[in-house]
Amino acid sequence: MATFQSLPGFREFYPDALARRNHIFRLWRQTASTFGFAEYDAPVLEPLELYKTKSGDEIEAQLFSFTDKGGREVALRPEMTPTVCRMVGAKANALKRPIKWFSVAEYYRYERAQKGRERAFFQFNADIFGEPGPEAEIELIALLTQCMCAFGLTEQDFYVRLSDRNLWFYYLEALGLDEAKTRAMLSAVDKFEKAGEDAFKAYEEQHGPIGAELKAKILAFLQIKTLAALEQTLAPVGGEKLAARLADWRKVLGGLEAMGLARYVEVDLGVVRGLAYYTGFVFEAFDRKGELRAIAGGGRYNDLVAKLGGPELPAVGFAIGDVTLGLLLEARGLMPTLVNASDIYCVIGGEAERRAAFADIHALRAAGYRTDYPIREVAFGKQFKLASESGAKLALIYGADELAKGLVKVRNMSDRAEQDVPAAQVMEFVRDFFGGE
Amino acid sequence: MATFQSLPGFREFYPDALARRNHIFRLWRQTASTFGFAEYDAPVLEPLELYKTKSGDEIEAQLFSFTDKGGREVALRPEMTPTVCRMVGAKANALKRPIKWFSVAEYYRYERAQKGRERAFFQFNADIFGEPGPEAEIELIALLTQCMCAFGLTEQDFYVRLSDRNLWFYYLEALGLDEAKTRAMLSAVDKFEKAGEDAFKAYEEQHGPIGAELKAKILAFLQIKTLAALEQTLAPVGGEKLAARLADWRKVLGGLEAMGLARYVEVDLGVVRGLAYYTGFVFEAFDRKGELRAIAGGGRYNDLVAKLGGPELPAVGFAIGDVTLGLLLEARGLMPTLVNASDIYCVIGGEAERRAAFADIHALRAAGYRTDYPIREVAFGKQFKLASESGAKLALIYGADELAKGLVKVRNMSDRAEQDVPAAQVMEFVRDFFGGE
């Protein structure tokens, strides 16, 4: 029955899948908390105009957009950035700076589903507002790496490619390109990794042949992998803006090195990130083997808060997706087996004994012990099998003979040792048992 | 700028609001876990047909529904029940019974926003599949009450009204009503609390005058508050079905009493829950003062899994909403002040000292300590104010003089006591400090 299936690109999370998702969310939240980021959340549905203002009218083709029953043009959020800019912008004066915020939320894009890409996916988003200097980039790239390392991933597994749209602008300006040509060239650079030399076609159709010398310089720029090589290339070019920008680069890479994170970061000017709104450093995280889509991406976007109606407020942020990260963790054997074991299983003689058991069961649960029991009458012997399967460390046995004597039998499930406990002292016994583990 | 506001009925969660929401979610999840329920999740967007099949075509008026770019009729989920029925139905043979599942998720209804009702709201949903007997109702009503008591709410604050559609059917049948009249009468009962005697108008228009004797019996039935009164009313009526059903009632209320929960539960046949798909016990939770909308509601729905394409599978479940519960917690002073305090604040002399601090900052965060520092250069004296405001228990002071001697100064923020610690032993010192608190 086709109508009773979920939509393509939308995932159902059965308990084992949800346990894996929760594992990812838990470590993201815990890591962000150690970095002093505060969690926020926002509507799933937003005015369509919010996304058009940020990304242009073309964005609508990729959105789940519609007209609601009140005649509003709305869209399921494809990302958090414009929403968080609106929220921060609306209270910019009241919020203590730097504003360090994060969220874990779901996003929706009407795209062709493929490996590592769903139509509904989760992201961890972290942003710093109010800090114009590259110190914010240090803090965020450190957070990004730790959000991966927290799972046991190492520099063998992933790396962060760091690039800079400003550096490209300053360099291309020094090479004689005007702004239109610079934008066309960045668009070519964005496509170069996938398309190779074909990436330059659109530029040449618009602006004429690039020329061998310029192309060689651009291709050489794309080969740069270290700060030293970057300085060597740009020192002869000169100019104040480039010099100041290189100082920013030294600050970012020096800070990350001081944190012990240099091994995760590579200079890579091939990353320009298609989105037009980035205004400075941009970065993406990838698996080292290059088998997966980008795991994370971000950068500086100093103009967006004002563009969306707020005050001028510098901003830098990134997002990690759950799908690609999940694939990487599975591939590296870093997704733990997550089991939902009980602490205690209550074995119940018969209906008459059920009431005595119920009093303890509820008290144990209210005290925080994961407690289970056979919901309907089950043969005594089979209940011990259920107790075993539940993963409980302790079985409480409510038999008629024992209860008649005011006793409950307890069994340590690991060594099968049994003893009788006065019925009134079950809670005390359990506290000692689990407290003393 | 109107386009840059959120949609009506959709909430933005700034960090303080999200901390309150997370408090609610955390206690819900923790409670469900102690009861042995497994968490799942499911798509936000579903085929519209799923909801029409469950609730009839009229439901569409209340939904955020639209045609997606692939021509599919879709809707934002207004509830979890049909989705979870599909999921459980699809794997019914593989899942160990009873299937005890819960979720915490957001739902969307195009309704007029009013106090306690948003267009987007969260629910805790818990369901038991595969258990036909009233033992499942005991387990769920116990879970429902504990999901409220976990916040510190008591029987002074809320109660659960327990009713039974089967009992109404059997009683009205014994009183001579056919199925059509019974359904019309239940519809009147559903409206009675709000509309009073007017509630019977639709019935009388359709089926003629009710008659004084029948109406008196129905009004008396609505007055019943205890099992004893229920038995007294139904014993003279007789019949096997009623007798068996009263045994079920004794089992549910006896079980809840054994768990110490009788004080939370009232017999109240005025609850029939409008939705047509319930097939037995139904229940709702309300604040005792009657100031708020229903906090929770649920019941048995044995036919829905099969109706949605799965096997015959008995089911019972309930949902608690976040909005009304949040209002009740605020009104009772049970919403804690949640602060996101740092553990450690690093005071940094100048740029030269920053690198030494960075190494410790990252190591401390990776070890799980919430560590903050001034992201840009700030005067030394002002940093101690920031350290204080951050709520940190410990300040680490990276001054030039100390670092030259290989030392870091540490200040206990509660008593202002300071001491010098060798720079290489900062982590060890921090572990001792927090371990020994």
Image: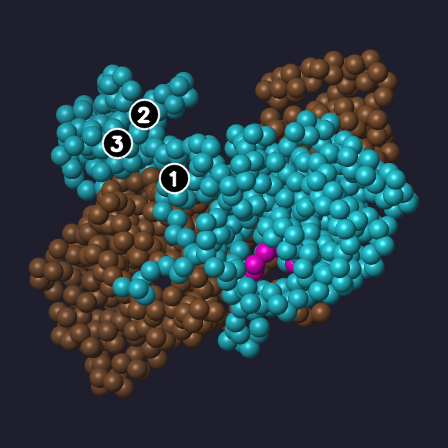
Chain colours: A brown, B cyan
Same-subunit check for callouts 3 and 1: no
On the image, the x and y values in percent for residue A105 come to 45, 53
Q: Tell me the CA gap for discs 1 and 2.
A: 16 Å
The CA distance from mark 3 to mark 2 is 11 Å
Q: Amino acid at mark 3?
A: Glu
Q: Is residue B29 visible?
A: no
**For numbered disc 3, what is the local secondary structure?**
helix
* Residue corresponding to mark 2: B393
| Residue B396 sits in quarter | top left
> At 71% across and 15% down in the image, what residue appears?
A424
Q: Is residue B25 magenta?
A: no
**What element does badge 2 sit on?**
loop
Distance CA(mark 3)–CA(mark 1): 16 Å
Looking at the rendering, the stretch of residues picked out in magenta corresponds to B77-82
- Nearest-to-viewer mark from 3 and 2: 3
Residue B187, percent across and down? Answer: 69, 57
Name the foreground residue: B180 vs A43.
B180
Residue B358: name its quadrant.
top left
Q: Which mark is residue B389?
A: 3
Mark 3, Cα crowd under 10 Å, few <14 / some 14-19 / many 20+, is few
* x and y percentages locating residue A408 in the rendered image: 77, 18
Q: Number of numbered discs present?
A: 3
Q: Is residue B291 left or right of residue A186?
A: right
Chain to which mark 2 belongs: B
Query: What mark, if any, has residue A33 been given in the picture?
Result: 1
Whether residue A67 is visible here, answered yes or no, is yes
A204 to the left or right of B332: left
The subunit carrying tag 1 is A
Q: Name the amino acid type tagged 2.
A: Lys
For label 2, the crowd category at 10 Å Cα-Cα, with few meaning under 14, some 14 to 19 and many 20 or more, is many
Tell me the chief SS of the magenta region.
loop
